Image (cartoon, rainbow, N blue to C red):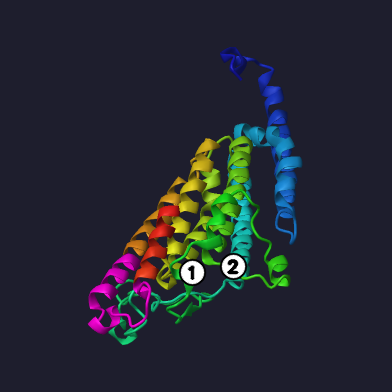
């Protein structure tokens, strides 16, 4: 191929048709083999990562052969892989996030404000601008109990920051134990699964296809499912502790991916941060408004000891300092 004299060789005219037939046959057989292997990835309950690592990775030379000699056939094989794996991941993440949301525990509602108990009617519509244009997320139940301690205290929930590397929850196991999860734990599990799966897929696509664009096409749908969950959840979250924990988890997960020298989820982490920070600001603004709108009688206590609002603020300030 690299010798210019070969094109002038008389023998080439005799063997070239046979070589072309051999190329077509080889390309066809390689195509059929890889397409069959890709079809096994679609089977229910298939561990596709095992197939990728133990079966497909052994045949990188076949992909290189198609890239060099297969022309349009490589495009067909590549498109088949992208279509197969994008659907597999989307179904996987859709089912997983839906199962986690069924385990979601009751969360703080719009009445859990610093000065929101004594004159609740004064704060009706306080969050209208916060969640305008959005509806409450199915699965998130907001309590009307303005005394809910989790709205002001971090408590044991802060332990999530020490368990960032813990495996994602298995929903049916948690359901059997009758466990209920706060949203920050639901988020941690979703994003932990996203990180581990995307790391595996990114490394595989880079090795197998020799470029990173394949990963982007394969994983775009799965990433969008997690981001859609966060986007829909935000208007239903009134607890600053939940929002602060989501921000911390997201930031530390990004650091983990940077330690792996992987930037494939950078855009995702930025999008989550851009959703959580404005929502946190809106919630804190609502707390300030509740204090400004509190009537005089609500700020006077008839009992010895600190005022209820002072207790709430102290707990809230302490939790923020811890985080």
Q: Is residue 38 above or below residue 281?
A: above
Label 2 vs 1, first from the N-terminus: 1
Name the residue beneath numbered marker 2.
181
Q: Is residue 26 left or right of residue 152?
A: right
Residue that protrudes farthest toward the front in the picture = 304
Q: Which residues are magenta?
A: 282-309
Principal SS element in the magenta part?
helix
In the image, 144 versus 6, the foreground residue is: 144
Query: Residue at 52% across / 57% down in the picture?
Result: 158
Q: Is residue 231 above or below residue 292?
A: above
Q: Quadrant of residue 45?
A: bottom right
**Where is residue 133 shown, x and y percent of the image?**
34, 75
For residue 103, the mark is: none
In the image, 25 versus 41, the foreground residue is: 41
Query: Residue at 37% across / 56% down in the picture?
Result: 274
Quarter occupied by the N terminus:
top right
Name the residue beneath numbered marker 1.
150
Q: Is residue 279 above or below residue 28?
A: below
Q: Secondary structure at mark 1?
A: helix
Query: Residue at 74% across / 48% down in the picture?
Result: 37
Mark-to-mark CA distance, 2 and 1: 13 Å
In the rendered image, residue 307 lying in the magenta stretch gets the answer: yes
In the rendered image, residue 35 lying in the magenta stretch gets the answer: no
**Where is residue 62 shown, x and y percent of the image?**
70, 35
Q: Is residue 225 left or right of residue 35?
A: left
In the image, 210 versus 177, the foreground residue is: 177
């Amino acid at each position: 191929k690299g010798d210019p004299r070969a094109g002038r060789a008389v023998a080439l005219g005799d063997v070239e048709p046979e070589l072309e037939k051999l190329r077509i046959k080889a390309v066809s057989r390689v195509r059929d083999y890889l397409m069959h292997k890709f079809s096994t990835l679609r089977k229910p309950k298939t561990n596709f990562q095992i197939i990728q690592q133990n079966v497909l990775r052994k045949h990188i030379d076949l992909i290189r052969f198609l890239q060099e000699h297969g022309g349009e056939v490589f495009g067909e094989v590549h498109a088949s892989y992208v279509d197969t794996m994008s659907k597999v991941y989307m179904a996987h993440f859709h089912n997983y996030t839906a199962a986690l949301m069924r385990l979601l525990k009751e969360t703080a509602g719009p009445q859990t404000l610093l000065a929101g108990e004594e004159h609740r009617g004064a704060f009706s519509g306080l969050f209208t601008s916060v969640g305008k244009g959005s509806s409450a997320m199915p699965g998130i139940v907001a309590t009307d109990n303005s005394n809910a301690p989790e709205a002001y205290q971090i408590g044991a929930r802060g332990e999530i920051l020490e368990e960032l590397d813990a495996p994602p929850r298995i929903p049916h196991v948690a359901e059997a134990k009758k466990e209920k999860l706060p949203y920050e734990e639901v988020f941690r599990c979703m994003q932990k699964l996203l990180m581990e799966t995307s790391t595996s897929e990114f490394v595989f696509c880079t090795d197998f296809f020799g470029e990173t664009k394949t990963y982007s096409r394969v994983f775009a749908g799965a990433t969008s499912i997690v981001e859609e969950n966060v986007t829909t959840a935000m208007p239903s979250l009134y607890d600053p502790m939940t929002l602060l924990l989501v921000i911390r988890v997201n930031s530390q997960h990004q650091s983990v991916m940077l330690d792996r020298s992987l930037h494939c989820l950078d855009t995702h982490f930025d999008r989550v941060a851009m959703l959580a920070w404005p929502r946190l600001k809106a919630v804190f603004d609502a707390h300030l408004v509740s204090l400004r709108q509190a009537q005089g009688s609500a700020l006077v206590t008839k009992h010895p000891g600190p005022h209820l609002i002072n207790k709430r603020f102290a707990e809230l300030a302490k939790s923020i300092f811890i985080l």
